[in-house]
RNA sequence: GGGCCAUUAGCUCAGUUGGUUAGAGCGCAGUCCUGAUAAGACUGAGGUCUCUGGUUCGAGUCCAGAAUGGCCCA
């Protein structure tokens, strides 16, 4: 006996029980242990940042991450899976800052870094617990007992080992990086924070400035262009000194000017112009911007030339900086020169852009490219550094007017106005941000750019366009990775620097190495490598007698996650630590990773970059890149919008399988999609309930007939219906296998849905009577075995996708009959398709039978004749002779479905249209005509069926069991009485009536009154009671 | 400002190498079937395939541009 299954089901409640079963019996652990020694399939778990409660949009990647490993495990692979948690970084710090009401870094310092970091740790650990609960409830199997946690001492030590390797390969260097900086908070802002604070109505000065050409330009350096600009070669001087006209909205940056940039391919012009003061002068600017800048009437063209010819021309500096202001790697020349740059646009300004590498991203990168120095004339509080000027020590915005006055006095100001435009402000304190070049540590990824690109060509991306699109472009435009942060809660950068000679540096590879340094201080027994403890560790410099102290920076949290292939095993590179190295070696390349698309520049990149830098190879083979989940209105889910759907509301109502199935099948994985709970409900009703009803149907009848798959032998050849659904089943197995092998759970799920629809709405529908009949013949047995095989195989096929319902079905259908079968469906082998069971001709014939039946129902409906009314014949026209032969074989299915006596075929559609007394439907070359003539005999049969239906309804209304035998009573007029008597055998058989009696007794039975086709009838039913002693 | 992706029925999505009248599910209206019944079947309404050009005998599909939304980067 199978456990009884009600068609009414609460999936969510069942799932909790199933999860309990897995936990108690260690099914997950067994699923790994039982494949010990088999070839390994490796998953890398991209660690979620545990800086908040997980939302519904986080479940998508959890689910996709789970499906493939489950499938591979069933296929026989050894698939250990280590969970990971990303714990460091600015988001965590910001959360704690919010709790404490802090807005500046100095508040953190006053509060105490030790205490601050302790709060960060606590905050993260609390969220990890929430993530664990959710992951388990989703049915995602991953080892959360032994996770890697990026803030663990061992993990940090491995990161140190990696940096140590990179450092001694010469891949770590210090350089400047321009970051949005808040002068009041004294901190850099992330791009996300910058985005929070844009204002598009910020008033700013807008000034045009003259940069006079230098007298010291050398003709042999610049070739022909000087003459065009009015240089007298003979006298070696200007006929009239021209000026470049440039434009800026930040006058204070002019003190840090090191170059002017022009667009190489645009046309520039030398013009004789009338200045706003009415004086004549020679100016150089882009030809396209002459009218806009100077006014139509105010200029006369002297010469024109492409921008690239201006390259190298010297001009006079506006301000001579103090020598201490000049920093960076570039060359400080005696005079500034013109350079070319791609970013110079003809949309605004003059086409000549003033370059201050210290205060602009483009400027800095251009400086890097053209070997220009960085000049810092402003300090981190936004005040002008002293240079003997009136604006010494002033805040930049207050310095602006003073600088404008100065330029005006020196005739260098062409025009000064005020404009409003978009400018970023600090989202916390409202101060205007400045872009500021700060000393930062870099990893020289550009040194391995070719290897990064070559490695990518070996990776399979799903969807494919990411490979050479977003990810490939990112690699093509690779810049060095600025990987240090001036923060607190992060992996500390393991570089120590000598107090006496800052050029003496030492990159420490492990905590052991640190402990072995001479005169080491501050390294206790339970050493926490976080700040501030690590900042207290000092040792003696190996090159002098100075004290070595750690540099203040911590690492970009993306470094932590990119280091996981190494650090998750606490592996210290190139040091044989036995098991740690062995674990690393076994998992050196991931077969599969899966995250959302925003990780192309995040985890996907840092993983790929570190692997390439360290090992010269990619560390993942296949990657599914998921689109984002939006809310029902198409907006991004975010905490600040307050539109995040709590996953528990779905899990408690519709359940995990429904959510999983929705996430897996509702849209292509790479697309964005809108989420609403009603769609999960739809999945539940359309797919899960259909499957469950089929399962429930099977169990109800199998129990009535005491069907036991273990004790009986399946009949050799089943009916057409059986062979058809088995053929569909094996086709399904090969399709699912193909889809999952190609990392396409969506395609796999959609195929399953199609199959379940066939199974429920044709196989079971057409087989019902085979299960009802009372005798236990081979046909019935064949039906049981067929449906049993379908359901059991289905449970294995859907196990990776919908693990709970799969387990539920498997336990009841398999474990109860075969106690020696694997303890769980997830310990089974994945089904293998048997091509010999696939019969393509039968499949196409069956699908045609369905189509023809559908058309037949349509024809009946058009004629207004109920299906319950038997009809004499249908006439069918197929497109091909072979189709007709196929249908002839399956005629009984169509006859039953359409409730007709006879099926006939014709070959011409015209004949069909000319049939009398028929309802005709044609579609796509097929046609069916239903003969609408109802003879007396057919009418009687129809009435009998109505009687049967009434009695069936009454059985249920009276609360009888499906298998109960009954006694039926009736009281009717002569016509109905005649029908009932005439067809009593049929009525008795259909309704399990032992007797059919008239009239209806007054008491002790269930009675209803009905009106059938206009005839009144009173009917009654009561249970049949065995009366062994009574003889009739 | 740049790159990538998407846009097909009220909603969520299919639509293969360009080739009959563009489909499904849900929802809506109606009818039916019912010994799986909180299912199921049939019919109907609902489409300028976002827009504008182009290539072609033929475009939802290929090309160019625009709009809207999303992501990433400035």
Image (tube, rainbow, N blue to C red):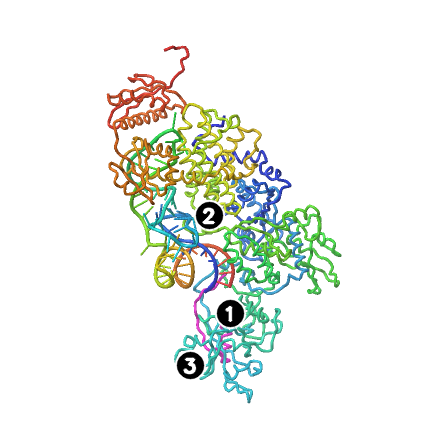
A584 lies left or right of A708: right
Q: Secondary structure at mark 3?
A: strand
The alpha-carbon separation of the residues under discs 3 and 1 comes to: 27 Å
Q: Is residue A621 magenta?
A: no
Circle 2: is it few (<14), some (14-19), or many (20+) Cα within 10 Å?
some
The image quadrant that residue A779 belongs to is: top left
Looking at the image, residue A263 lies above or below residue A634: below
Q: Chain of mark 3?
A: A
Labels 2 and 3 in the same subunit: yes
Looking at the image, residue A408 lies above or below residue A500: below
Q: Earlier in the sequence, mark 2 or mark 1?
A: 1
Query: Measuring 62% from the left and 57% from the top, which residue is drawn there?
Result: A612
Residue, disc 3: A299
Residue A3 spot, x, y in % from top left? 49, 28
Residue, disc 1: A342
Q: Look at the image and give the residue range highlighted in magenta.
A: A400-425
Residue A635 spot, x, y in % from top left? 43, 52
Q: Secondary structure at mark 2?
A: loop
Looking at the image, residue A941 lies above or below residue A566: above
The image quadrant that residue A970 belongs to is: top left
The image quadrant that residue A980 belongs to is: top left
Q: Which is closer to the viewer, label 2 or label 3?
A: 3
Residue, disc 2: A644
Labels 3 and 1 in the same subunit: yes
């Amino acid at each position: 006996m199978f456990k009884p299954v009600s068609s009414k089901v609460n999936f969510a409640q069942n799932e909790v029980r199933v999860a309990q079963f897995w936990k108690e019996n260690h099914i997950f652990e067994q699923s790994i242990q039982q494949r010990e020694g088999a070839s390994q399939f490796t998953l890398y778990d991209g660690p979620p940042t545990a800086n908040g409660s997980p939302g519904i949009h986080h479940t998508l990647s959890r689910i996709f991450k789970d499906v493939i490993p489950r499938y591979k495990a069933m296929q026989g692979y050894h698939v250990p899976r280590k969970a990971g948690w990303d714990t460091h970084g600015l988001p965590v710090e910001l959360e704690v800052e919010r709790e404490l009401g802090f807005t500046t870094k100095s508040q953190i310092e006053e509060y105490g870094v030790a205490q601050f970091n302790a709060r960060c740790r606590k905050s993260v650990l609390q969220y990890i617990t929430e993530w664990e609960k959710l992951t388990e409830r989703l049915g995602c199997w991953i080892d959360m007992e032994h996770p890697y946690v990026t803030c663990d001492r061992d993990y940090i030590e491995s990161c140190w080992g990696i940096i140590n390797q990179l450092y001694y390969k010469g891949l770590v260097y210090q350089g400047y990086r321009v970051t949005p900086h808040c002068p009041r908070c004294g901190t850099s802002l992330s791009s996300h924070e910058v985005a929070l604070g844009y204002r598009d109505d910020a008033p700013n000065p807008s000034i045009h400035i003259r940069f006079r050409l230098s007298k010291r330009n050398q003709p042999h350096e610049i070739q022909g262009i000087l003459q065009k600009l009015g240089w007298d070669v003979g006298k070696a001087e200007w006929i009239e000194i021209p000026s470049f006209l440039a434009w800026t909205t930040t006058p204070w940056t002019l003190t840090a000017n090191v170059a002017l940039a022009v667009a190489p391919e645009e046309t520039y012009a030398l013009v004789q112009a009338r200045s706003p003061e009415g004086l004549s002068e020679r100016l150089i600017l882009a030809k396209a911007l002459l009218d806009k800048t100077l006014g139509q009437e105010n200029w006369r063209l002297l010469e024109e030339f492409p921008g690239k010819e201006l390259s190298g021309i010297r001009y006079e500096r506006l301000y001579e900086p103090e020598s201490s202001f000049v920093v960076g790697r570039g060359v400080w020349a005696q005079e500034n020169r013109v350079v070319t740059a791609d970013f110079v646009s003809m949309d605004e300004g003059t086409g000549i852009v003033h370059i201050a590498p210290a205060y602009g991203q483009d400027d800095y990168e251009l400086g890097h490219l053209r070997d220009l120095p960085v000049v810092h004339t402003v300090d981190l509080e936004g005040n002008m550094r002293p240079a003997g000027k009136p604006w010494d020590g002033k805040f930049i915005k207050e310095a602006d007017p003073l600088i404008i006055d100065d330029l005006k006095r020196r005739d260098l100001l062409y025009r000064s106005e005020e404009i409003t435009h978009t400018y970023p402000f600090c989202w916390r304190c409202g101060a205007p941000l400045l872009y500021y070049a700060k000393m930062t540590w870099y990893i020289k990824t550009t040194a391995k750019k070719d290897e990064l690109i070559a490695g990518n060509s070996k990776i399979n991306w799903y969807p494919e366009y990411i490979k050479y699109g977003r990810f490939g472009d990112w690699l093509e435009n690779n810049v060095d990775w600025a990987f240090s942060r001036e923060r607190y809660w992060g992996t500390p950068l393991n570089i120590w620097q000598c107090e006496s000679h800052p050029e003496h540096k030492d990159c420490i590879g492990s905590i052991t190495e640190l402990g072995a340094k001479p005169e080491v201080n501050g390294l206790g027994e339970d050493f926490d490598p976080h700040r501030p403890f690590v900042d207290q560790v000092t040792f003696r410099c190996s090159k002098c007698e100075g004290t070595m102290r750690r540099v203040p920076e911590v690492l970009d949290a993306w470094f932590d996650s990119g280091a996981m292939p190494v650090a998750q095993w606490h592996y210290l590179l190139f040091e044989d630590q036995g098991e740690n190295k062995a674990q690393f070696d076994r998992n050196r390349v991931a077969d599969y990773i899966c995250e959302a698309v925003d990780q192309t520049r995040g985890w996907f990149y840092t993983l790929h970059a570190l692997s390439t830098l360290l090992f010269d190879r990619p560390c993942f083979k296949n990657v599914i890149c998921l689109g984002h989940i939006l809310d029902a209105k198409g907006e991004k889910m975010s905490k600040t919008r307050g539109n995040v759907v709590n996953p528990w509301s779905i899990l408690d109502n519709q359940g995990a399988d429904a959510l999983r199935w929705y996430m897996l099948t509702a849209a292509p994985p790479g697309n964005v999609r809108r989420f609403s709970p009603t769609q999960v409900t739809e999945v539940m009703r359309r797919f899960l309930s259909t499957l469950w009803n089929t399962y429930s149907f099977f169990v109800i009848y199998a129990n009535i007939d005491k069907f036991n798959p273990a004790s009986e032998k399946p009949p050799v050849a089943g009916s057409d219906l059986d062979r058809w659904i088995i053929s569909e089943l094996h086709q399904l197995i090969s399709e699912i296998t193909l889809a999952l092998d190609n990392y396409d759970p969506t395609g796999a799920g959609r195929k399953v849905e199609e199959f379940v629809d066939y199974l429920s709405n044709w196989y079971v529908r057409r087989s019902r009577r085979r299960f009802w009949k009372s005798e236990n013949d081979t046909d019935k047995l064949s039906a049981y075995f067929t449906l049993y095989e379908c359901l059991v195989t289905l449970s294995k096929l859907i196990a990776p996708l919908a693990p709970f319902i799969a387990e539920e079905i498997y336990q009841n259908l398999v474990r109860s009959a075969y106690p020696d079968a694997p303890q769980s469906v997830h310990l089974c082998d994945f089904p293998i398709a048997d091509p010999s069971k696939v019969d393509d001709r039968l499949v196409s014939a069956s699908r045609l039978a369905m189509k023809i039946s559908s058309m037949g129902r349509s024809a009946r409906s058009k004629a207004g004749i109920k299906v319950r009314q038997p009809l004499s014949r249908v006439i069918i026209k197929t497109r091909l002779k072979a189709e007709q032969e196929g249908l002839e074989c399956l005629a009984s299915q169509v006859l039953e479905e359409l409730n007709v006596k006879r099926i006939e075929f014709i070959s011409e559609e015209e004949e069909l249209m000319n049939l009398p007394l028929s309802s005709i439907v044609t579609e796509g070359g097929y046609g069916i005509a239903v003969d609408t003539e109802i003879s007396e005999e057919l009418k009687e049969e129809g009435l009998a069926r109505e009687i049967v239906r009434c009695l069936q309804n009454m059985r249920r209304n009276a609360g009888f069991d499906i298998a109960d035998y009954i006694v039926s009573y009736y009281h009717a007029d002569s016509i109905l009485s005649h029908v009932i008597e005439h067809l009593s055998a049929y009525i008795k058989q259909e309704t399990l009536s032992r007797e059919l009696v008239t009239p209806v007794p007054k008491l002790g039975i269930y009675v209803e009154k009905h009106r059938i086709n206009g005839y009144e009838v009173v009917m009654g039913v009561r249970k049949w009671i065995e009366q062994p002693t009574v003889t009739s």
